[in-house]
Amino acid sequence: MDDHELLRLHVAGNPDAFGYLVRRHRDRMWAVAIRTLGEPEEAADALQEAFISAFRRADSFRGDAKVTTWLHRIVVNACLDRIRRRQVRAADPLPEDEDRAAELAGPAEDDPAEVRERRLDVLNALKQINSDQRSALVLVDMEGYSIEEAAAILGCAPGTVKSRCARGRARLLPLLRHWQTTRSGSEAPDVPAKTAAEAVGTE
């Protein structure tokens, strides 16, 4: 059964349909939450709140978008609510989230310790940009959504997503510039803001 059918069955009273839907998309929703919030406990709480909200509000789904778009919007909103509520604590430990985005597109033969250090640097840098820019970058550069899909999830215009991504990449670039070096240790040529996106989302 496709997602729309599972959601329809849930609204109709099927006790198992929503559970199937959650299991189908839980991993990707978790990836969005952990990358947006940067803390496993916060991400887990936000994801739980989002799924409870989706469970209760399923009858409000109009069917004019993908169910995944609707779910992502609820998850992102739950994360943003937590970001707005919590006090920023600069000394918090960073999660060791294994994701392709944090590998900085490094070659496979890189020193594992260096790769881990770069991963932590990227996660730390993401925590230093504002939540709107972070959400846009997570969806577009890390999750691979198109500008239009990210706009539907975030509930804003595509141009707004483009602007947030551009500003976020520009903010990330100086934070990650120390990795833009050659293996000999010399400075690499200056790079455009797009490089920051590559540092957090492309392979």
Image (cartoon, helix red, strand yellow):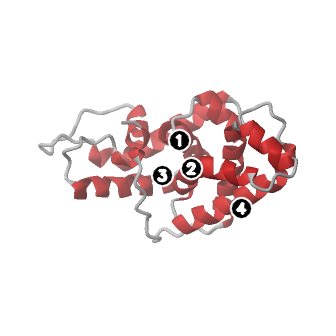
Query: In which image quadrant can residue 164 be found?
Result: top right
Helix, strand or loop under label 4:
helix
Q: Which residue is mark 1?
A: 137
Query: In which image quadrant can residue 199 be found?
Result: top left
Marked residue nearer the N-terminal end (4 or 1): 4
Q: Position of residue 29 (x, y in %)?
A: 60, 50
Q: Position of residue 108 (x, y in %)?
A: 23, 43
Q: CA distance from mark 1 to mark 2?
A: 10 Å
* Circle nearer the viewer, 3 or 4: 4
Marked residue nearer the N-terminal end (1 or 2): 2
Q: Marks 1 and 3: CB-CB under 8 Å?
A: yes
Q: Which residue is mark 3?
A: 126
Q: Label 2 is placed on what type of residue?
A: Val
Q: Position of residue 79 (x, y in %)?
A: 64, 56
Which residue does the image show at 71% across and 56% down from the upper left? 51
Helix, strand or loop under label 2:
helix
Marked residue nearer the N-terminal end (3 or 2): 2
Marked residue nearer the N-terminal end (2 or 4): 2
15 displayed left or right of 20: right
Q: Residue at the left extreme? A: 184
Q: Which residue is mark 2?
A: 32
